Amino acid sequence: MHKRWIAVAVAVAVAFGCTGLAMAASGSSSSQQLRTTLHLVEHPINEHVVDLPPKGDSQGDQFPFSNLLFNASNTSQVGRDQGNCIRTNPARGEWQCSWTNKLADGQITVEGPFYDTRDSRLAIIGGTGIYRDAHGTMLLHARPNGYDFVFSID
């Protein structure tokens, strides 16, 4: 009888151990979640404001763009971005933006506020390729002749 209980205990322990390994391998455990950081530099080369009535900086103006993306050291082009922003509040320097960052291994789409005079944090709303399950945030920070895009991908 004693040997039988030992065999059952070993079988239960092995079953729980395999379940734990399967959860860790599949990423089912929330404690196993990893964050990846991707730093890109945008070079604004193809963008302009479309001034809709009333004349001047006003709510509803459009800001379409298609720009180059470089690696974090700003030494080689790694992709392009394309999108549009809509002026929502000129007095506070606010735009609402949505755009796609096209890279060799997939795309990352972001949406959220852009501020004229301070850093912006946008939501990662999806992706393709290796970024197909991406979510998280993108910090946008102004730099001379461009912007830092720092993606925190969960």
Image: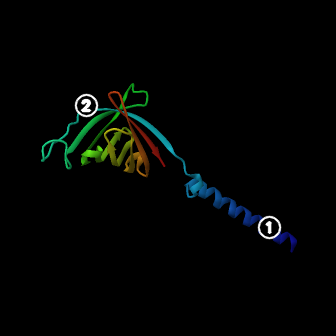
* Disc on the earlier residue, 1 or 2: 1
- Most extreme residue toward the right is 2
Q: Secondary structure at mark 1?
A: helix
Left or right of 146, for residue 151: right
* Nearest the eye: 50 or 31: 50
- For mark 2, give the secondary structure: loop
State whether residue 134 appears in this view: no
Q: Quadrant of residue 3?
A: bottom right
Q: Residue at x 68, y 63 (%)?
A: 16
Query: Which percent across, then down, holds residue 49?
Result: 19, 39
Q: Where does residue 133 sit, x and y in percent of width and height?
A: 43, 52
Foreground residue among 33 and 63:
63
Residue 36 in the figure: left or right of residue 74: right
Query: Label 1 belongs to which residue?
Result: 7
* Residue 12 position within the rendered picture, expressed as x and y whole percent measured from the top left: 73, 66
Residue drawn at the location 64% of the way across and 61% of the way down: 19
Residue type beneath disc 1 = Ala
Question: Which numbered circle lies on residue 45?
Answer: 2
Please state which amino acid type lies under the numbered disc 2.
Ile
